[in-house]
Image: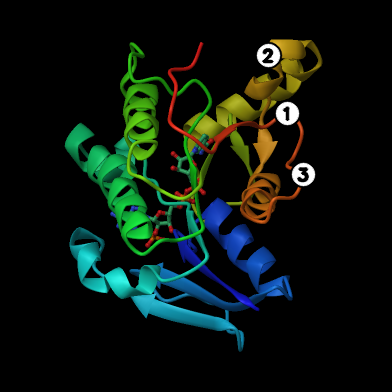
Amino acid sequence: MAKRALILGATGLVGGHLLRQALDRPDYGEVRALVRHDLTEDHPKLRQVNVDFDRLWEWGDEFQAEHVFCCLGTTRAKAGTRAGFERVDYGYVHRAAQLSAQHCAEHFVWISAVGANPLALFFYPRVKGRLEAEIGDLGLKRWTVVRPSLLLGKRPEIRLGEVLAAPAMQLLRPVMVGPWRKYRAIRAEAVAAAMVAAANGEPMASGLDYRTGGPYRAMA
Ligand SMILES: NC(=O)c1ccc[n+]([C@@H]2O[C@H](COP(=O)([O-])OP(=O)(O)OC[C@H]3O[C@@H](n4cnc5c(N)ncnc54)[C@H](OP(=O)(O)O)[C@@H]3O)[C@@H](O)[C@H]2O)c1
């Protein structure tokens, strides 16, 4: 039977790749995207649903899908405040995971970040780590979290931090081996492909850090 994919964040860098990859797969009969801005894509399998992410529970029925992919996220600069960042990167993703659990999604797949840790000194990895810890306890049938390092890809806007970090990461790439491999910059489409592969039980991009399945355990 054809599966249904639900994507949150399909207007973003990783989410956009994931949307196109899911639409290209014959095993998805419907690809649903929850958005706050209209998508540019048009496809017979695509169903766009405009939502208010602050009231996501009102669209709970949309979570009746085999695979739910969450690629939501903002930056501290875009959000304006720490609370604004947490509202999206923690609150919206947590709510999406809750709704996926309630509607018995087969697999919930989301993006965190390398080094995520609820005990981290810095704010960003701490928020991501807290979310990882809590999603593991929501009773999802199956979950996978991918934890990329710097994302590479074309964005409509310039993010100075990413522009400056990319060449430095390229220089360091040869020494990022063994346990350091997960810190290599990675193309956004490779992350999207790994997420789709994870949901479908296929091999994922090597080098990408991820966790899957059972209850969350603190990272070493
Ligand atoms: N950038 C990196 O190098 C990096 C590294 C590791 C992990 N990550 C994580 O990877 C994830 C995806 O990153 P990305 O670069 O693909 O993200 P992105 O291009 O910034 O896209 C983010 C998505 O989230 C949505 N979104 C943002 N704020 C929202 C809000 N207030 N309400 C509703 N939707 C909102 C955006 O929708 P609109 O189009 O409507 O704004 C967009 O669809 C994020 O969680 C990020 O933290 C990023």
Looking at the rendering, which quadrant does residue 215 occupy? Answer: top left
How crowded is the residue under tag 1: few (<14 C-alpha within 10 Å), some, or many (20+)? some
Spot occupied by residue 124 in the image (x, y as percentages of width and height): 36, 26
Left/right of residue 49 with respect to residue 176 in the rendered view: left
SS type, badge 3: loop
217 over 140 or under it: above or below: above
Q: Please name the amino acid that badge 3 sits on.
A: Pro
Residue extending furthest toward the right = 174
Q: Please name the amino acid that badge 2 sits on.
A: Trp
Left/right of residue 181 with respect to residue 155 in the rendered view: right
Residue at point 75% right, 50% down?
202
Residue that badge 1 annotates: 207
Q: Earlier in the sequence, mark 2 or mark 3?
A: 2
Residue that badge 3 annotates: 203
Spot occupied by residue 139 in the image (x, y as percentages of width and height): 36, 45
Q: CA distance from mark 2 to mark 3?
A: 21 Å
Residue at point 39% right, 36% down?
136
Residue that badge 2 annotates: 180
Spot occupied by residue 141 in the image (x, y as percentages of width and height): 46, 50
